[in-house]
Image (cartoon, coloured by chain):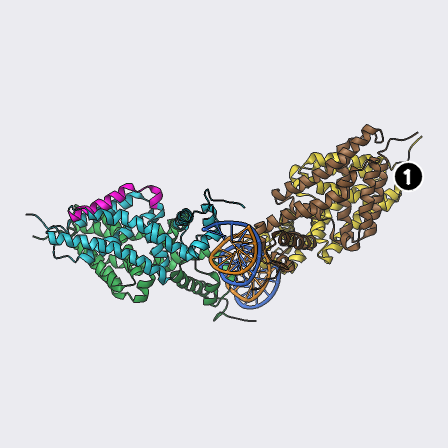
Chain colours: A brown, B yellow, C green, D cyan, E blue, F orange
Amino acid sequence: MKRRSVDCRNPDATRERLLQAAFTEIYKRGYIAASVDRIVEESGLTKGALYHHFGSKKGLARAVIDSIISRSVVDSFLSPLGDPVDPIDAIKTCITTKIGQLTPEMVACGCPLNNLAQELSASDDDFREQIEALYERWRMGLTDVLARGQREGSVRHDVDAIEVATFIVATLSGIAGFAKSARSVDVARRSTKILLGFLDTLRVQVA
Amino acid sequence: MKRRSVDCRNPDATRERLLQAAFTEIYKRGYIAASVDRIVEESGLTKGALYHHFGSKKGLARAVIDSIISRSVVDSFLSPLGDPVDPIDAIKTCITTKIGQLTPEMVACGCPLNNLAQELSASDDDFREQIEALYERWRMGLTDVLARGQREGSVRHDVDAIEVATFIVATLSGIAGFAKSARSVDVARRSTKILLGFLDTLRVQVA
Amino acid sequence: MKRRSVDCRNPDATRERLLQAAFTEIYKRGYIAASVDRIVEESGLTKGALYHHFGSKKGLARAVIDSIISRSVVDSFLSPLGDPVDPIDAIKTCITTKIGQLTPEMVACGCPLNNLAQELSASDDDFREQIEALYERWRMGLTDVLARGQREGSVRHDVDAIEVATFIVATLSGIAGFAKSARSVDVARRSTKILLGFLDTLRVQVA
Amino acid sequence: MKRRSVDCRNPDATRERLLQAAFTEIYKRGYIAASVDRIVEESGLTKGALYHHFGSKKGLARAVIDSIISRSVVDSFLSPLGDPVDPIDAIKTCITTKIGQLTPEMVACGCPLNNLAQELSASDDDFREQIEALYERWRMGLTDVLARGQREGSVRHDVDAIEVATFIVATLSGIAGFAKSARSVDVARRSTKILLGFLDTLRVQVA
DNA sequence: ACCTCCGGGACCGCCCGTTTCT
DNA sequence: AGAAACGGGCGGTCCCGGAGGT
């Protein structure tokens, strides 16, 4: 009969195509406004396949968070922190790298994780806990590297690493959201500059 | 025949009740998930009244932003800045006052303005411009008071007032959003503490 | 625009048309297999009207039971019992009248009340209680008339009126169901003959 | 790879497990509401197995009737009639035995055969004929034993054995259905008592 | 013999907005 | 100004069956 998949009988590829189409649709329209009909159409598959792999729209979205979005957070903000460079520099590099990659389209769509967090945290506890867990990983990554800086003597000891890590994540999310409303890359860059300046105040002052 | 309003033929009261019901519904569920049927039910009125006054769901939501949400921003973050006290202190007072009033329920629901901004900015330009205009007023209020501080000599001249104002608004929004995901008043308070500390670094150092 | 109803803006007629179309569809296919799409199509109306008047498929079906089916039970088996004739004769007349009206189509479709009772009683308590209440009215009607016969001396005192009434209703339902399976009017008539004979054994023997 | 059956490659056991799971699901929900997905899940097997053995949902249900339900009718109502005791007593014993075994759960779910008969007879001729054939066996079993009673002189000759047999089956089905709606074992017992009394009137009166 | 994967369709719910009428 | 009836349509869920593979 009809075979719409490139090569049928390839569950992993099917899953991945659904995930990608779902990510795009959800990113563009938000979770609630996203349509599974559009997702399956975009993916070139059918509702049967979607239901088989993910069980529901919610299951699909959760899988998107767990795979695509999670991976993006790790790649951009956690993996780079492993390098044995100066902690403050490492954090600043993560941020400037990300800011440097911003396109107007990306700014207009905002941060995928923050979008879902704001849309769903208040009304769905399953989503909230999943998102919170991802934020927690991010926060802990920053906390660890700041604590390392304190042990190594490059970061002031009178700051609470956890509080600062939380502040960084919150501020980055806020900047992403604010720049989305303003539809302005420039706003993002200039706000980030302030954040980077703040990060420098965390360093131990060398006489 | 039936009269469901306490006092019929009172356009202003009708408008107000619809606005309040709409604000609550939208605050709880977000704009897209909000149902006009539930709004009219909650308000005790009917769709006829709603569409007579606001024309559409979108018109209703825009009126909510223009009246209820706008008023709340002005009352909490703009009016207090008019007092002729030290600018940094004035800003800090706004923030600590707001933080002090936070209940767990409010934290769990987030900032109404930020919620709508994140949900709608990417997909609807009318909403985005309206929300951006409100953010702009907020930002300008902060910019003005910071500039006054610079003229009066209490705020450092090597900072860009607009950039800092933007940063403050973005960070406050980010903290509200992050605390919502974490469902934690404590997270909000501790992140805010960092922000307040940052504000102190803007002061001109005396001796 | 389009006006599909004969005369629009007539809520009672709209309700009635939906009820009739729903009764027919449910009678032919059963509740679960009945399609609301077919019902609205058959009625010439739309889902909006259906949802407005009945709220759900279940609400529609319950309204069908409460109005159409209930009325049919009352008209065929309760109202005639009010006549001040001999109770046993009255009951027998009800039954023979109904049997006489049977067409092959009616036999093939069964008793609307019994159909719903068998399909839904086990899985939905709301339906079950509603159906049971209707059966109870029927049963009580028979019980009352038998008790009157006992007071008047035409019915034996050594029978329990309630038990016999229950037996009659159960047997009539059973005959309707069995004739439906057999698709045979003759089976219905011959089984009914036995029931009528049984009813005669309830009379007080006149020397 | 995965083998979900305890012992794979055992066609008969596979068949039997599917039949049992299907019987349970259909008994609980009715044929149309029964889900083949749930059946395969309950059975611990997969759709591949189901469609291999039965070809379709309908084929599965027909197999359920032919094996499980059919067996239950034969065991409860036909086999016991073979004993060379008094025919009326034999029939009464069948009935009282069955009634004695009734649990509230069984009453609430009704008679499996009657359930399917009422649900499907009107809309599917294949099912109807299959069910009718089973009823016919039951009816013939009763007819035969009544006729034997007439030959042996214990049953009155002025009754039509077939008509009475039909009446008995119809009444038993009706009682089962009625008790299901009423969710009452007591209703079943008391109605049955009337039926048993009626059976006694079929005996030849001994001076 | 059995299983995963997937197709395509139909289901009911509910949506927002308009029309008609009081 | 407001109340109620109603129009179309799209939403996600879930269904049964079959094709390809082990």
Q: Is residue A161 visible?
A: yes
| Mark 1 surroundings within 10 Å by alpha-carbon count, few (fewer than 14), some (14 through 19), many (20 or more) | some
Q: Element at badge 1?
A: loop
Instruction: Residue B26: give x, y in percent of width and height.
Output: 64, 50
Residue in view at x 30 percent, y 66 percent:
C104
The chain that hosts pointer 1 is B
Of residue A78 and residue B108, the one placed in the foreground of this image is A78
Of residue A72 and residue D204, the one placed in the foreground of this image is A72
Residue C88, picture quadrant: bottom left
Of residue B78 and residue C57, the one placed in the foreground of this image is C57
Instruction: Residue E9: give x, y in percent of width and height.
Output: 52, 63
Does residue C202 appear to the left or right of B139 in the view shown? left
The type of residue carrying mark 1 is: Arg
Q: Main secondary structure of the magenta part?
A: helix
- Relative to D33, say whether A94 is above or below: above
- Highlighted range, magenta: D86-107
Of residue D34 and residue C136, the one placed in the foreground of this image is D34
Q: Which residue is mark 1?
A: B156
Instruction: Residue C72: give x, y in percent of width and height.
Output: 33, 60
